[in-house]
Amino acid sequence: MPAELTERLATLFRWIDPGPGTSHLVSDISGWWRDPAVLAELGPALVAPYRAARPTVVLAPAVTGLLLGPLAATALGVGFVAAHKPGDGRLPAGSLTWAQSPPDYRGRQVDLAVRDRHLGPGDRVLVVDDWVRTGAQIHALYDICAARGAEVLGAAVVAVDCPPEVATELRITGLVTGADLPA
């Protein structure tokens, strides 16, 4: 991956204090979406480590994954499958396969669903997301793939901020680490 992209991602990143009553800062990655050069490079950079494995589909969770997933899928010339969350206003009708994540960094468990007709045996899946701290959502997406008979090749994320053993276990590659981003 070009060092310029890593530098640009760090430059465009911010931590935001959401105000009284909150216990943590919130990552602001909106600068990544505003920069046309970053948008052009994200898809190809995310999929580069997996290109030789020949994914047949990219799977990504709502909400940010709905942007990153299609960028990665386009770079590979394959289709995209969205993983939906209840309450995000986009829960599809029809037959769905569900999985619940283990607790995330805030102790929440996230329910994710994928349309059954879009994922199945013979699919070679690349999971894509913006950030991974615990791997909770990636675990749930891998569970959905297993339930549908699809093979997971790994996960490509923009920011890897999880323990190395989690990244190794889940086969996660990233463009930046938490240490690369401004404090």
Image: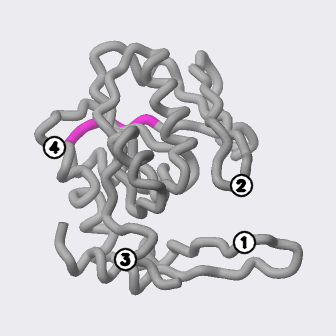
Label 4 with label 3: CB-CB less than 8 Å: no
User: Is residue 175 or residue 94 the one in the foreground?
Assistant: 175
Q: Amino acid at mark 2?
A: Arg
Q: Residue at x 42, y 60 (%)?
A: 160
First reached walking from the N terminus: tag 2 or tag 4:
4
Mark 4 or 1: the one toward you: 1
Label 3 with label 2: CB-CB less than 8 Å: no
Question: To which residue does mark 2 refer?
Answer: 106
Q: Amino acid at mark 1?
A: His
Mark 3 or 2: the one toward you: 2
Q: Position of residue 118 (x, y in %)?
A: 43, 24
Q: Amino acid at mark 3?
A: Leu
Q: Position of residue 139 (x, y in %)?
A: 51, 35
Mark 2 secondary-structure assignment = loop
Image position of 98 (left or right of 146): right
Check residue 80 for magenta coloring. yes
How would you rate the neighbour count of disc 4 (Cα within 10 Å): few for under 14, some for 14-19, many for 20 or more?
few
**Which disc, if any, is residue 9?**
3
Q: Position of residue 109 (x, y in %)?
A: 70, 40
**Which disc, if any, is residue 51?**
4
Q: CA distance from mark 3 to mark 1?
A: 21 Å
User: Is residue 45 or residue 161 the one in the foreground?
Assistant: 161
Question: To which residue does mark 1 refer?
Answer: 24
Task: Give the magenta range.
Answer: 77-81
Q: Amino acid at mark 4?
A: Arg
First reached walking from the N terminus: tag 4 or tag 3:
3
Q: CA distance from mark 4 to mark 1?
A: 36 Å
Q: Residue at x 59, y 20 (%)?
A: 96
